[in-house]
Image (cartoon, rainbow, N blue to C red):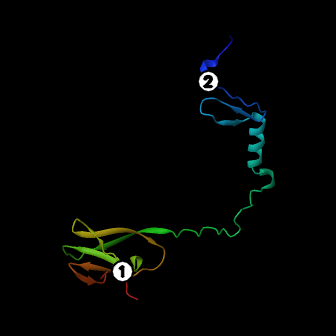
Amino acid sequence: MGNTGLGKHRDVHSSDSTLEFETGKKMFPSEHEAKRILSAREPDMDSYSDYDYEDDAMEPEPPQKRTIPTVFRWENGGRDVLLAGSFNEWKARIPMNLSQGEFSAIIELPEGEHEYKFCVDGRWIHDPNAVST
């Protein structure tokens, strides 16, 4: 008589390196084998120094240029005042804000000399308060 197993055939392999679980039929390594596999994957960190790099061609990042908040003012009237200059390659016209009868804009500019002009009501005008050289 004995155990009939309800008609299911169960095939269990005995191995010291794997265990087979009936649900899902996934093979799992033994604890000893898992440790051996993991240790083979880990690099020997004692052989590296803090200054060793895998990529010898790596270049240091260039220092970022310092910017300075720069105030531009237009006090000579107009309804619509825009600003452009060498700092944006004359491509963008920056709208200036009107407050208490004066147009102004604050722009972060890299250190150095810059040229600029105002566009007042569609006409390009040099800053009458700027020193000419």
Location of residue 113 with respect to 1 vertically, above or below: below
Q: Residue at x 69, y 29 (%)?
A: 11
Instruction: Find the residue positioned furthest to the right.
Output: 47
Q: Which residue is mark 1?
A: 90
Quarter where residue 48 is shown: bottom right
Q: Residue at x 60, y 29 (%)?
A: 23
Image check: 23 left or right of 49? left
Query: Which element type, helix, strand or loop, lies under badge 1?
Result: loop
Quadrant position of the C terminus in the picture: bottom left
Three-letter amino acid code of the residue under disc 2: Lys
Q: Residue at x 35, y 78 (%)?
A: 91
Q: Which residue is mark 2?
A: 8
Location of residue 11 with respect to 93 vertically, above or below: above
The spot of residue 123 in percent (x, y) is 23, 83
Three-letter amino acid code of the residue under disc 1: Trp
Image check: 112 left or right of 81? right
Q: Nearer the viewer, residue 76 or 97?
A: 97
Quarter where residue 106 is shown: bottom left
Query: Which element type, helix, strand or loop, lies under badge 2?
Result: loop
Quadrant position of the N terminus in the picture: top right
Image check: 86 left or right of 7? left
Observer-side mark, 1 or 2, equals 2
